[in-house]
Image (cartoon, rainbow, N blue to C red):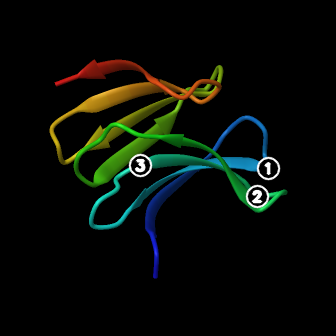
Amino acid sequence: KKYGVGIVRFLHDPSTVVCASSNEWDHSVRCWSVHENRYLRYLKGHRARVVGLEVSPKDDIVLSASLDATVRLWDVRSDGCAGMLK
């Protein structure tokens, strides 16, 4: 088993999901194309397991909460974190 997926949320495009996945060294939020069966984007920044994941009802903005005591704001159209609360 390479990665474990704990949380999955659909984006506004019904063939695309974001998921919180982790293993011993990586705690990324991943954007995955269900139709193409491949990852589209890796949203890296959390240093511990992601325990909460929500998608904005208006656009593809994602909030993730982690055991590293941070909440991060992501725009899935870009690679970087758009904001962080500690």
Q: Mark 2 points at which residue?
A: 34
Categorize mark 2 by other alpha carbons within 10 Å: few (<14), some (14-19), many (20+): few
Q: Name the residue under label 3.
A: 28
Q: Which of marks 3 and 1 is nearer the N terminus?
A: 1
Q: Mark 1 points at which residue?
A: 15
Categorize mark 3 by other alpha carbons within 10 Å: few (<14), some (14-19), many (20+): many
Q: Residue at x 48, y 26 (%)?
A: 74
Q: In this view, does 43 lie above or below 4?
A: above
* Amino acid at the residue labelled 1: Ser
Q: Is residue 7 above or below residue 63?
A: below
Separation of marks 2 and 3 at Cα, in angstroms: 18 Å
Q: Is residue 14 above or below residue 64?
A: below
Percent position of residue 80, x then y? 47, 25
Q: Residue furthest toward the right? A: 35
User: Residue 47 occupies which quadrant of the picture?
Assistant: top left
Q: Which of marks 2 and 3 is nearer the N terminus?
A: 3
Q: On residue 68, which mark appears?
A: none
Q: How many numbered circles are shown? A: 3
Q: Which residue is drawn at 29% across and 60% down?
A: 25
